[in-house]
Image (cartoon, rainbow, N blue to C red):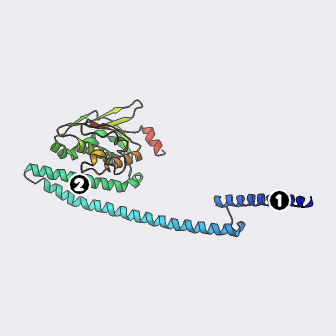
Amino acid sequence: MSIQYINVINILIFLLFLLWRYVKEMKQLRLLCSGGAVVGDLSPFQQKILQQVTRTIDELEQQINKQKIDALERQDEIIAWVHEMKSPMTAMKLMSDQIEPYTLKERMENEWIRIHLLLDQQLHATRLSTIEKDNRLEKVALQSVVYKEIGELRSWCFEKGIGIEVDKLEDIVTTDSKWLAFIFRQIFSNAVKYSKPNTEIHIYTARDTKGHVLLYVQDFGCGIAAEDLPRVFQKSYTGTIGRETTAATGMGLYLAKQSAEKLGIRLKVESQEGVGTTVAIQFPLNNEYLKSYGM
């Protein structure tokens, strides 16, 4: 009987010891996690863990800083390269204006447009990560943006016999004009690229029930397959039609979507294969835009 009594006492003492150690360790662990622990209050084992964790964090921070510096250097190099390319591009444009006959001049202008669009995509893709620093809130007349971009691609439209029908572009929206032009350019150039020859592209505005301004770009081209539609904004996704042409990069709509989200703009796509595609650019209300920027 006395042996059983001693065993019970030993077990109780052991359980009390475990409970005491648990409470003490948890208290120190909470202090350690909250950053309020004093090294002298920690056990030698915990001090070793703290030293190892601190050393690992310092090493990771150094690696992250180095990667950030490398990324910024690569970004600057790409931007510098794109700007360097603009000089020969400008020279090519001036020379193309003097070329005869007209058919050769038209072909050269169209190839110039394609190179210009690719360089434009690369420049904005590089700047996308810092769009918040390159963003200016202002009142923008949609008509001026749309007409300018149509003018830039007019020779491409002439080559394919595509007519542009513009209606109801009197709206003025609050956004960044440069990035809006880039978004519209990606959508409009896609409409031209995938339109059938001798068809039209309709560009018009409307308002939804909540008062949002919507800018529509509607083409009557090859359309988008139903299975491709949910993925048109994914990076490098070219879809069924894109695999049939080397001109598709899968970057235009992806960059347009990423840029639009930074500006509080929503993009919506409706399409039917063989019939055409309609892209809607939905602008935020003024209070929604200001709220998204914490104003």
Residues packed near mark 1 inside 10 Å, few (<14), some (14 to 19) or many (20 plus): few
Q: Nearer the viewer, residue 269 or 286?
A: 269
* Quarter that holds the N terminus: bottom right
Residues packed near mark 2 inside 10 Å, few (<14), some (14 to 19) or many (20 plus): some
Residue most toward the front? 1
Q: Secondary structure at mark 1?
A: helix
Residue most toward the top? 209
Q: Nearer the viewer, residue 142 or 225?
A: 225
**Residue corresponding to mark 2:** 115
Q: In percent of the image, x 75 and y 61: which residue is there? A: 21
Q: CA distance from mark 2 to mark 1?
A: 82 Å
Choose top left, top right, bottom left or bottom right for residue 287: top left
Q: Secondary structure at mark 2?
A: helix
Choose top left, top right, bottom left or bottom right for residue 214: top left
Q: In percent of the image, x 45 and y 39: which residue is there? A: 288
Q: Amino acid at mark 1?
A: Ile
Residue most toward the right? 2
Q: Nearer the viewer, residue 171 or 8?
A: 8
- Can residue 217 be seen in this snapshot? no
Q: Nearer the viewer, residue 101 or 152?
A: 101
Q: In percent of the image, x 68 and y 68: which residue is there? A: 45
- Can residue 100 be seen in this snapshot? yes
Which is closer to the viewer, label 2 or label 1?
A: 1
Name the spot of residue 44 as percent of width and height, x first.
Answer: 69, 70
Name the spot of residue 164 as percent of width and height, x first.
Answer: 21, 38
Name the spot of residue 93 as percent of width and height, x first.
Answer: 17, 55
Q: In percent of the image, x 35 and y 48: which residue is there? A: 254
Tell me the tag on residue 11: 1
How many numbered circles are shown?
Answer: 2
Q: Amino acid at mark 2?
A: Ile
- Determine whether label 2 and label 1 are within 8 Å by CB: no
Residue 161's place in the image compared with 120, above or below, is: above
